Amino acid sequence: MLQDNFGRRFHYLRLSITEVCNFRCTYCLPEGYQCDGDRDFLSLEEITHLVQAFAALGTSKIRLTGGEPSLRKDLSQIIERCAATDGIRQVALTTNGFKLPQMIDSWIDAGLTRLNVSLDSLDPRQFQAITGHDKLSTVLSGIDKALSRRISVKVNSVLLKPYSEGMLNQALSWLKDNPVTLRLIELMQTGDNQAFFNANHLSGQPIKNRLLAEGWIPVVRDRTAGPAQEFSHPGYAGRIGLIMPYSRNFCTSCNRLRVSAKGNLHLCLFADKGLPLKHLLSQGQGDALQARLRSLLADKQASHWLDKGYTGATQQLAMLGG
C-alpha cells in the first residue's frame, strides 16, 4: 500500500491522458487550448504499465481525466486496459460531455463504472458563456443516456459569483427526479487566473449552511471517495456534494495521487513540480517503478497551502484534470 509520512493511504489515481481540451471555460482555458510544447502524451502501453504498478501497490480506483479525455481516439481501449488490471475495482472518467451521447455505450461496454460530467450551468445561455459552446442539450442528453445504463453519474459545477445562486436553485429542482450527485466546487486559484479568482471566488460554506437548514443530511464517505462533503435528502433522488479546498483540514483525508499526460507524478494538484516516471514505463520495469513510487511519497506535504496563495506548478486545471 502506498502511504505517506502522515499516515495517509492512497487507493486512488487520477490519470490525465491528454492536456488538450475543446472547451474554453472561463476559469480554466478562456483562450482555448494553446499548444506550447510537444504532445508526447502517454501511449496505451505506457498507461497499461503505469496502472499495473499502481494496482500492485494497492490502488483500486482509476479516474481518467484531461484536458478532455474523449479527444483520445483510443479512450475505449484505455478504459478496457484499466478495467482488466488485477486489483482495479473502479474505472471512472471525467468529461465535458461533448461526445457523451455517441460514446457512452462504448465506454461502459469497455468497463467504465463511474462518470463525472462538468456542467457549470443548467441555463443554456450561461452554459455557453462559461464554456464557449452551445452544447447544454447535448451534455444533458448524454447524462440521461448514462443514467439509463445504470452507471454512477456525478456532475461537477464550479462555484462562480455571476452564476452559482441560479445554478443551485435550478439544480435543486433537477435533483428531485434525477439520481445524480451534483458537486459544487470552490474556484481554485492557479498560476494564470489570479484576477479572475479574486473577482469570482465563492465559499461553499453558506451553501452547506443552507442545505443543513433545509434538511439535507451528511453522507458517510467511502474510503475511495474524493474530498466532497456529500448530502442527501429524503425528498430528492439526487445528492449534493461540496468541495471546499480552502476549508480547514481539507487535506487530512487525501487519498489520491496524480499522473500527468506526459508521465509525471504530482503528489498534489498544487505541487511545485511533476516527478518524472515515463522512463520507467516500459515492459519489465514494474519493480523499479513501484520502488520509485514508494520513494517519492516521502516528499508529499501535509497541505496544498492554497489558503496562502501558493499554486505550485499548476498554471491551469487542464494540466492535471483538477
Image (cartoon, rainbow, N blue to C red):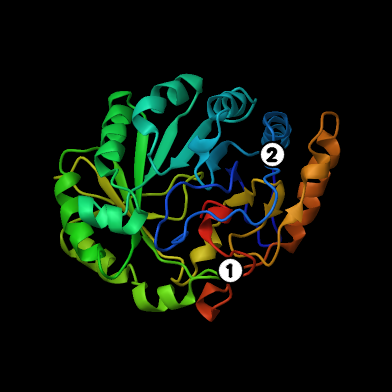
From the top left corner, tell me how far across and down residue 315 is, in percent: 58, 65
Q: Helix, strand, or loop for circle 1?
A: loop
Q: Residue at x 46, y 19 (%)?
A: 109
Q: Residue at x 29, y 37 (%)?
A: 138
Q: Residues within 10 Å of mark 2 (few under 14, many from 20)?
A: many
From the top left corner, tell me how far across and down residue 225 is, in percent: 47, 46
Eyeballing the image, is 62 above or below 5?
above
Distance Cα–Cα, label 1 vs label 2: 26 Å
Q: Which circle marks residue 42 in the picture?
A: 2
Q: Residue at x 58, y 71 (%)?
A: 311
From the top left corner, tell me how far across and down residue 254 is, in percent: 55, 56
Q: Nearer the viewer, mark 1 or mark 2?
A: 2
Eyeballing the image, is 139 above or below 151?
below
Q: Residue at x 55, y 38 (%)?
A: 61
Q: Residues within 10 Å of mark 1 (few under 14, many from 20)?
A: many
Is 144 on the left or on the right of 29, as rendered? left
Name the quadrant of the N terminus: top right
Q: Residue 268 or 30: which is nearer the viewer?
A: 30
Name the residue beneath numbered marker 1. 304
Q: Residue 155 or 206: which is nearer the viewer?
A: 155
Is 144 on the left or on the right of 243, as rendered? left
Is 195 on the left or on the right of 204, as rendered? right
In terms of image quadrants, where is residue 87?
top right
